[in-house]
Image (cartoon, rainbow, N blue to C red):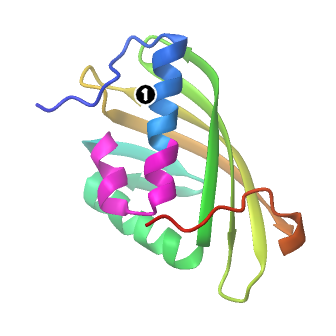
Amino acid sequence: MNTRPPLPPFTEETARQKIQAAEDAWNSRDPERVVLAYTVDTEWRNRSDFVNGRAAVVEFLRGKWERELDYRLRKELWAFQDNRIAVRFEYEFHDASGQWWRAYGNENWEFDEFGLMRRRFASINDLKIAESGRNFRWARPA
């Protein structure tokens, strides 16, 4: 079995490393890259969607990033203990009509002993914003 360091139990430093790795992967908008951080049988709740397994995660993320254009995300540590991390996040995107959105939320993560995320529960709220109100103005990754 491959490991995905840092491994639990987490310290503040290793929890922050895990969060940064997740932020970097999600900002790549590459479902095949993102899914490598999850167990084969990972369980997700994302808003009102329930997603189980890597193949379903890839499909979910492809659809997400087809709708959420120029997506940019920031995550920050909220709490950690043993093999769990709680994260606060916000991200921005625009839809096909050009309307910009900012999403705010919280995630609860649970990892296996190999450092793979076995459970991810996300609660998310969306807010329409003007393009001039954006906080995240990054160049598209290569």
Image quarter of residue 101 = bottom right
Q: Residue drawn 62% across and 40% down?
A: 75
Circle 1 Cα neighbour tier, 10 Å, few/some/many (<14 / 14–19 / ≥20): many
**Along the viewing direction, whichever of 122 and 90 lies nearer the viewer:** 90
Image quadrant holding the N terminus, namely top left
In this rendering, the answer to whether 73 lies above or below 82 is: below
Q: Is residue 122 left or right of residue 109?
A: right
In this rendering, the answer to whether 107 lies above or below 17 is: below
Q: Residue drawn 41% across and 55% down?
A: 51
Q: Which residues are magenta?
A: 23-37
Q: Position of residue 140 (x, y in %)?
A: 55, 68
Q: Position of residue 17 (x, y in %)?
A: 47, 27
Residue 73 colored magenta? Answer: no
Image quadrant holding the C terminus, namely bottom left
The overriding secondary structure of the stretch rendered in magenta is: helix
Residue 135 seen in this snapshot: yes
| Residue beneath disc 1 | 110
**Along the viewing direction, whichever of 89 and 23 lies nearer the viewer:** 23
Q: Is residue 3 left or right of residue 28?
A: left
Q: Position of residue 14 (x, y in %)?
A: 45, 18
Residue 130 seen in this snapshot: no
Residue 35 colored magenta? Answer: yes
Q: Residue drawn 59% across and 57% down?
A: 48
Q: Position of residue 117 (x, y in %)?
A: 36, 35
Image quarter of residue 126 = bottom right
In this rendering, the answer to whether 51 lies above or below 98 is: above
What secondary structure is found at the residue carrying circle 1?
A: strand
In this rendering, the answer to whether 122 lies above or below 142 is: above
Amino acid at circle 1: Glu
